[in-house]
Image (cartoon, rainbow, N blue to C red):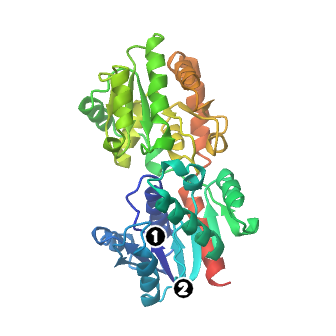
Amino acid sequence: MRIAIDARKIHDFGIGTYIRNLLRHLARLDSATEYVLLCQDRDCPIAPALGSNFRAVPDNSPPYSLREQLSLPWTLRRERADLFHAPHYVLPPLSGRAAVVTIHDCIHLMFPQYLPNRMALGYARSSLWMAARRSDRILTVSESSKRDILRFFDVDPAKITVIYNGIDERFSREPPEEEIVRVRERYQLEGDFVLYAGNVKPHKNLERLLDAFHLVRQRGFDNVRLVVIGDQVSKYAELRRAVHKYNLHKYVRFLGYMPDEMLAVLYRLATVFVFPSLYEGFGLPPLEAMASGTPVVTSNISSLPEVAGDAALLVDPYEPESIASGLMSVLGSAEVRSELRARGLQRAADFSWERSIQRIHRIYGEVAHH
C-alpha cells in the first residue's frame, strides 16, 4: 500500500506538531507501508531519517493557494498513491484518491473577521466543505470540534472520528539541570513569571491577557513578569501598543518561536502557564504545561474544558478580571499550585501520541481496503 501525506506545514505551530508526531510514530509503527511525503524542497531530507519506506516528493505550492488545487492531484496521480491523508483539510476536487482528512477546528467559520479578506473566507469555506463532503473519513481532535463540523456541514456523524492529540515525550522528561540553569541565565528568568506559548493570532486573546496582567501587577504582584512565546509577534502591533499603554516594557518579554527542547525547560521554570484562547480545536500547550508539572490557567469555553478536565483553573477569556483572578489564585497560593501540579500530571498521562497514531494507522487500513 502506498499512502501520501501532505507534510508542507510541518514547521507550523499546531498543525506542524500534529504532522511531526504523525510521521515519527508511523515510522516506529509501520515499516511495510510505503509513505510518500509531499514536502517543501527544504524539508525533503526528513524522509530518509524516518526509514527506508518513507520518500519525499517536492511540492512547493503555498498552503491554501489556488496552485495547490492542481499540484497536489498531479503529484498524487504521478505517484500512484492508494490513499491520501490531508492533515489540514485541503482536499482538491481533482485528487481522485481514497482520502482521510483531518479538520482540527472550524475557526475560519467561527471567526471570519480574523481572515484577511472575503476571498480568504471563500477559500476556507469551500476547502472545508470539499474536505468534509469528499473525504472517506474525517478525523478531528475533540468532541467540541466534531460538534462544530456537524453544525457547519451536513455529513454523517459516523464519518467523523475523534482522536485526541498526544503529548511529546520530551515534556514528561525532566531536562538536565545544566540545561535548566543555562536557559534561566540566558533569558534572565529569576523570580516568578507567567508563561504563554502558542501562536499570536487574534483569537489567542493576548490583548486581554495583557489587560489581565496589568491588573495582576496593580494588585500586589508587581514583581511578576509575563513571557510570551510565539511566532509572528511583529505582525500584531496591537500587542506592542498594549504593552506601551500600561508601561509594561520591563515586565513583558516576547521571545519568539522556541523549539520543543527549549519550551520544555521554559514550562518547568514558569510559575504558572496561561492560555486564555477564545477558540481551540484541541489546545495542546496547556497539556504540555501539565506534563511538565506547571499549574495551568485556561479558558472555560470551546474544547479547553474537555481537554483540561479538572486539572486546570478555568476562567472567562472575555473578562480580563476573570483571567487576572485566576492568575492571582495560583501566584498567591503554594497550596493551589501544588494541587494543580498533581492534577495536571495525572491528566496529561491520559494523552499519548503513540496510542493516537495507532488509531490513525488502523483507519488508513479501513479506508484503503473499503
The quadrant holding residue 65 is bottom left
Q: Secondary structure at mark 1?
A: helix
Identify the mark at residue 82; answer none if there is no mark.
2
- Between 179 and 75, the residue placed more toward the observer is 75
Identify the mark at residue 287; answer none if there is no mark.
none
Callout 1 crowding tier (Cα within 10 Å): few <14, some 14–19, many ≥20: many
The amino acid type, in three-letter code, at marker 1 is Ala
- Between 321 and 335, the residue placed more toward the observer is 321
The mark lying in front, picked from 2 and 1, is: 2
- Between 299 and 203, the residue placed more toward the observer is 203
Q: Position of residue 207 (x, y in %)?
A: 45, 32
Residue extending furthest front? 118
**Residue drawn 40% across the image and 56% down it:** 12
**Residue drawn 52% across the image and 82% down it:** 95
The quadrant holding residue 36 is bottom left
- Between 187 and 299, the residue placed more toward the observer is 299
Label 2 and label 1: CA atoms lie apart by 18 Å
Q: Could you tell me if residue 33 is visible in this image? A: no
Residue extending furthest left? 186
Q: Could you tell me if residue 163 is visible in this image? A: yes
Count every numbered label the image shows and give the total: 2
Q: Secondary structure at mark 2?
A: loop
- Disc 1 target residue: 27
Residue 157, placed above or below residue 112: below
Residue 348 left/right relative to 173: right
Callout 2 crowding tier (Cα within 10 Å): few <14, some 14–19, many ≥20: some
**Residue drawn 40% across the image and 62% down it:** 10
